[in-house]
Image (spheres, rainbow, N blue to C red):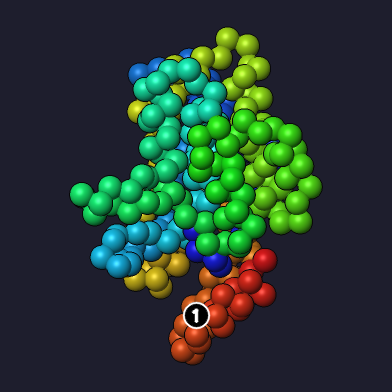
Amino acid sequence: MPDYQRPYVWGTDQVIDLLEDVADWRVSRPESEYFIGSIVLQRKRTDGIIEFDLLDGQQRLSTCLMAHAVARDLTQNALLKESCRKSVYQEANPFDDIPERLRIVYDIRDEVRDFVDRFIKPDGGTNDQTALQQAKNASDLSVRNMANALLEIRRYFSETPEFNLESFFQFFRNRVLLVYVASPNLDDAFQMFTVLNDRGMKLRGSDILKTHNLRALRAEGASDVEQRVGTVLGGN
């Protein structure tokens, strides 16, 4: 999640809508696949490792990551717990040259990284509901909304009548589809960013302006720091 990304802004309605849509589809069409949209990535190689910068799709991916963290902490099913753990966090394996890292690395702001390291990365991190309630008053917008999202996901998983966590995630992990478009060329990736929709909603004008600002700064040979400052000033 590159540092020019806007904050995590989904509130309760968007988070619960996503979970309810998936749950309703599982009941009404259990053999069908459910499409939750598309994301745009820039493909990069860093220290010999293939990774991707996310240009569009942060809200959905972050919400899916948090849903897996909550399920990991709530389920008593050992297989589901391990599957969710692996979807949140990759353990190091020096024998296969696999580094330790989160599945989504947040380079947005230090406050967001600290929040993720405390509440999402470790087993049991989402169980500290008192601290999550306090985090809803944090100065950082992403932290406030992510804390609220974790609490709302826990409430939905725990309190929805006739909801079965194991059945939901069997469907979620096998039948829910997300299409990604990736390019190693940043300009091509930004072009795709400007024309794709986010779950049927047009991108904000500020997001498109941010894209054009970054293009212009790159064309002028601006440094990485200047590009980051320029996109923050022009796109948030």
Q: Residue pushed farthest left?
A: 95
Q: Is residue 137 above or below residue 193?
A: above
Q: Residue pushed farthest top?
A: 162
Q: Nearer the viewer, residue 195 or 123?
A: 123
Left or right, 121 with respect to 90, comes to right
Q: How many marks?
A: 1
Q: Nearer the viewer, residue 83 or 17?
A: 83
Q: Nearer the viewer, residue 189 or 73?
A: 73
Residue 65 rendering spot, x and y as whole percentages: 50, 40
The residue sitting at 51% across, 43% down in the picture is: 121
Residue 187 rendering spot, x and y as whole percentages: 40, 73
Crowding at mark 1 (Cα within 10 Å: few <14, some 14-19, many 20+): few
Q: Secondary structure at mark 1?
A: helix
Give the residue pinned by disc 1: 224
The residue sitting at 56% across, 14% down in the picture is: 163
The residue sitting at 40% across, 38% down in the picture is: 87
Left or right, 24 with respect to 144, comes to left
Q: Residue pushed farthest right?
A: 137
Q: Is residue 103 above or below residue 232?
A: above
Asked which quadrant contains residue 226, the reply is: bottom right
Q: Is residue 28 above or below residue 101?
A: above
Quadrant location of the C terminus in the rendered image:
bottom right
Q: Residue pushed farthest bottom?
A: 220
The residue sitting at 62% across, 49% down in the picture is: 115
Asked if residue 179 shows in the view, the reply is no
Residue 23 rendering spot, x and y as whole percentages: 52, 22
Asked if residue 61 shows in the view, the reply is yes
Asked which quadrant contains residue 19, the reply is: top right
Q: Amino acid at mark 1?
A: Asp
